[in-house]
Image: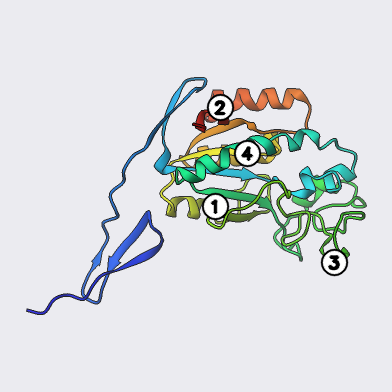
């Protein structure tokens, strides 16, 4: 009897692979080894499985967080939006070392804006004459051809320079408040066999909360990292975000719980 040819791993994620050869497809995934991690959280302490947890960082990009970005150009104080930078710098090495995938979900429109409805455009250009999604942004520190608000590949859609994407990190463009709407985010998380999602970024009461809520609706366990999240909205918006996350959609904790 001849030996069967050696099987080959089939799948882009090591967490979700078949073993295949010409004679057989082995659909049994590699055994899952849990890595329990205890967190001091609200409204209750939680135990998560670090081996099935990912971090999503939302909109830590120039147009929202840089003093010369779009938000600052319309008179918004972006200092609060920069407060997650230092905590993220501190916690990212620990999360990566623990094997947690890191996903950067940034607003990055199509140049032709064909996937954006009038209602989406109106949020940032209510009078039709303001600088809105994809419009040229005067004064940004880059070449004029790249100088379009929240356009994929532009300076405004790029991460702030203080936060560096590691080679293994994953980038996903979004086009709405929620990072799940009309994107591949859910497919990527499921292919990575993720059950728990940590959330960080800006603005807490808008894009972060919308993405967290959609994650909850899709069945993910949600934990908001309070010190890695911020908003330029009034303080009552931050308070309402914490209340709603703890009451309805998940848990909140500090990122220091992940540090040795």
Viewer can see residue 119? no
| Location of residue 136 with respect to 222 vertically, above or below | below
In the figure, 114 relative to 129: above or below? below
Residue 145 circle label: 3
Relative horizontal placement of residue 260, taking residue 209 as reference (left or right):
left
Label 1 with label 3: CB-CB less than 8 Å: no
- Which numbered dot is residue 252? 2
- Give the alpha-carbon distance from disc 1 to disc 4, as whole Å: 21 Å
Question: Is the residue under label 2 in contact with that under label 4 (CB below 8 Å)?
Answer: no
Secondary element at image label 3:
helix
Dot in front, 2 or 1: 2
* Residue 21 percent coordinates (x, y): 26, 73
Task: Name the front one of labels 4 and 3.
Answer: 4
Among the 4 quarters of the image, the one containing residue 240: top right
Q: Horizontal placement of 144 versus 260: left or right?
A: right
Q: Residue at x 27, y 60 (%)?
A: 27
Q: Quadrant of the N terminus?
A: bottom left
In the drawing, what numbered circle is on residue 185? 1
SS class of the residue under badge 1? Answer: helix
**SS at circle 2:** strand
Residue at horizontal 70%, vertical 60%?
A: 115
Residue found farthest to the left? 1
Q: Nearer the viewer, mark 1 or mark 3?
A: 3
Please tell me which residue lies in front, 82 or 123. 82
2 or 1: tag closer to the N-terminus: 1
Kindly check if marks 2 and 3 are in contact, taking CB atoms under 8 A apart as contact. Answer: no
Callout 2 touching callout 1 (CB < 8 Å): no
Residue reaching furthest to the front: 260
Question: Earlier along the polypeptide chain: callout 1 or callout 3?
Answer: 3
- Per the model, the C-alpha gap separating discs 1 and 3 is 29 Å
Q: Which mark is residue 88?
A: 4
């Amino acid at each position: 009897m001849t030996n069967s040819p050696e099987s080959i791993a089939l799948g882009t994620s090591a967490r979700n692979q078949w073993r295949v050869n010409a004679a057989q497809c082995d659909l049994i995934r590699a055994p899952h080894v849990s890595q329990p991690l205890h967190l001091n959280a609200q409204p209750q302490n939680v135990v998560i499985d670090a081996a099935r947890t990912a971090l999503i960082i939302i909109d830590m990009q120039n147009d929202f967080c840089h003093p010369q970005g779009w938000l600052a150009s319309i008179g918004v104080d972006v200092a609060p939006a920069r407060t997650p930078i230092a905590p993220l710098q501190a916690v990212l090495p620990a999360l990566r070392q623990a094997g947690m995938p890191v996903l950067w979900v940034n607003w990055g429109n199509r140049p032709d804006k064909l996937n954006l409805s009038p209602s989406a455009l109106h949020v940032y250009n209510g009078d039709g004459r303001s600088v809105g999604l994809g419009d040229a942004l005067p004064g940004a520190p880059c070449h004029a051809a790249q100088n379009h608000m929240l356009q994929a590949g532009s300076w405004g859609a790029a991460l702030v320079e203080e936060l560096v994407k590691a080679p293994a990190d994953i980038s996903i463009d979004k086009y709405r408040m929620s990072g799940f709407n009309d994107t591949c985010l859910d497919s990527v998380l499921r292919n990575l066999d993720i059950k728990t999602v940590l959330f960080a970024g800006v603005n807490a009461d808008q894009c972060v909360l919308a993405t967290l809520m959609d994650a909850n609706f899709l069945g993910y366990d949600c934990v908001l990292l309070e010190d890695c999240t911020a908003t330029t909205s009034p303080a009552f918006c931050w308070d309402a975000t914490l209340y709603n996350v703890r009451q309805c959609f998940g848990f909140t904790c500090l990122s220091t719980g992940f540090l040795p």
